[in-house]
Each structure stands twice: as C-alpha cells, then as structure tokens.
C-alpha cells in the first residue's frame, strides 16, 4: 500500500460545540453592562453557563475583569 505525501495543506478548523451565548466581551469597556433577560425558572441554570463563558474568556485575557450577577429578570455582566 502506497501513500502520497503532500505539503502546504492547512489544518481544518475544529468545529467543537456551538456556543449558546455569543456575548461580545471583547468590545466591552470598563463600566459597561450587558443584561441577558430570561424567565425566572431558567436563571439559576443559565447563570452557571454564562459564568463559565466569562471565566474561559478571562483565562485568555487576564487583564480584563468581569462580574456576573443573577438578577430578578435575568443575568447581568459588568466589566470592571
């Protein structure tokens, strides 16, 4: 069995799992706020997903600080 070796072929980008929220954290400036409205029954579960999203972003950008807070009508994200 023979194989052909080729060079210069770029590696395809991995697809991974699609993001549930595509929050524009990179465009936020200090003092900015994003409110994500949702039903009260969903808040406790969704705030964990959003916190993990922000935490992964902070690991890649350690100079940017954020806080995520559970609110009565959704979830709020503040850039500090």
Image: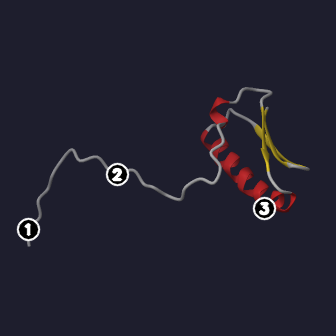
Image mark for residue 45: 3
Per the image, label 2 sits on a secondary structure element best described as: loop
Identity of the residue drawn at 63% across and 37% down: 61
Q: Farthest residue to the bottom: give it.
A: 1
Per the image, label 3 sits on a secondary structure element best described as: helix
Q: Farthest residue to the front: give it.
A: 39
Q: From the viewer's perspective, is the residue at label 2 or at label 1 nearer?
A: 2
Few, some or many C-alpha atoms within 10 Å of disc 3 (few <14, some 14-19, many ≥20)? few
Residue 8 image offset from top left, x and y in percent: 21, 44
Q: Quadrant of the N terminus?
A: bottom left
Q: How many marks?
A: 3
Q: CA distance from mark 2 to mark 3?
A: 33 Å
Q: CA distance from mark 2 to mark 1?
A: 24 Å
Q: Is residue 43 left or right of residue 59?
A: right
Label 2 or label 3, whichever comes before in sequence order? 2
Q: CA distance from mark 1 to mark 3?
A: 53 Å
Q: Is residue 7 left or right of residue 29?
A: left
Identity of the residue drawn at 8% across and 68% down: 2
Residue 42 image offset from top left, x and y in percent: 80, 60
Identity of the residue drawn at 78% across and 54% down: 47
Q: Are marks 1 and 3 in contact (CB under 8 Å)?
A: no
Residue 41 image offset from top left, x and y in percent: 85, 62
Label 2 or label 1, whichever comes before in sequence order? 1
Q: Is residue 8 left or right of residue 67?
A: left
Location of mark 2 (residue): 12
Location of mark 1 (residue): 2
Q: Quadrant of the C terminus?
A: top right
Label 1 or label 3, whichever comes before in sequence order? 1
Few, some or many C-alpha atoms within 10 Å of disc 2 (few <14, some 14-19, many ≥20)? few
Q: From the viewer's perspective, is the residue at label 1 or at label 3 nearer?
A: 3
């Amino acid at each position: 069995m023979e194989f052909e070796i080729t060079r210069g072929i770029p590696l395809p980008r991995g697809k991974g799992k699609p993001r549930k929220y595509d929050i524009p954290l990179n465009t936020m400036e200090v003092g900015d706020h994003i409110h994500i409205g949702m039903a009260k029954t969903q808040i406790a579960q969704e705030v964990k997903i959003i916190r993990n999203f922000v935490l992964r972003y902070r690991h890649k950008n350690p100079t940017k600080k954020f806080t995520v807070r559970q609110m009565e009508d959704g979830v709020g994200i503040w850039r500090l």
